[in-house]
Amino acid sequence: MMVVRERILETALKMFRTYGVKGVTMFDIARDCGISKKTVYEHFEDKQALIDEGMQQLLNNHINYFTQCLQTTDNAIEEMVRNMKYVTNMAKTLNPVMLHEIQKYHPDTWRSIESFKSDGMLGNIKENLKRGMAEGLYRQNLHIDIVARMRQLQLEAAFDPIQYPADQFEMHEVMEQVTAHFVLGIATIRGHKLVNQYLQIKEEE
């Protein structure tokens, strides 16, 4: 029974990410799953329930990845670069229309995304800063609350089509540039060597 439910959720999430939430109907999801619309309604009360659960799953995947990344990386700089690559890859498969429509038509779901950004994302950045300072890779005199918010604003700007229109900028290039700029600004001399290594920046002669 659970398998069908998971398949519906997975299909819905894939369609939302591709087409946005407004244009996708319960019938579309049922057809894509190869089941009846009645079966979809047996598992999910309405489209709102699917949107809520789908977004929650997306956010949980993020948190799980960040946690795993913290545990499996050698240092704070590797962790930051790996997180950046994860977020960039995720963005490639996400139609920005989806987030725009959720913000406009599904304010409750949007609130959970906002709280993820303020708690999950910001918390993750702060932990990374503390880790880098403890490892001697980031400067000791960083004001964590200020610097973490600056990083969060950079990430949000990279996703903003007004700041970086998709027809002019490649998301992964924007992310690599702003990340290099940010991390070189907070790194110690020892940290700089690692940044150049992880981001494959050629050292100037």
Image (spheres, rainbow, N blue to C red):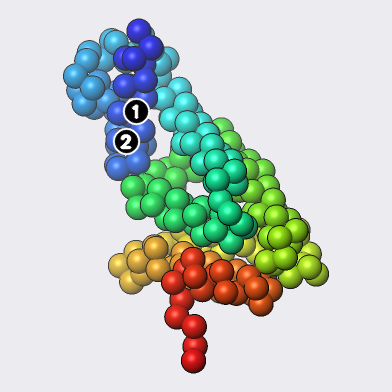
Q: Which mark is residue 39?
A: none
Whether label 1 touches label 2, CB < 8 Å: yes
Q: Is residue 162 visible?
A: no
Image quadrant assignment for residue 131: bottom right
Relative to 49, say whether 124 is above or below: below
Q: Residue at image x 78%, y 64%? A: 143
Relative to 102, say whether 140 is above or below: below
Q: Which mark is residue 10?
A: 1
Residue 183 pos. (x, y %): 60, 69
Amino acid type of disc 2? Lys
Q: Residue furthest bottom?
A: 205
Secondary structure at numbered mark 1: helix
Residue under label 2: 14
Q: Is residue 160 visible?
A: yes
Q: Residue at image x 60%, y 74%? A: 192
- Left or right: residue 163 compared with residue 136: left
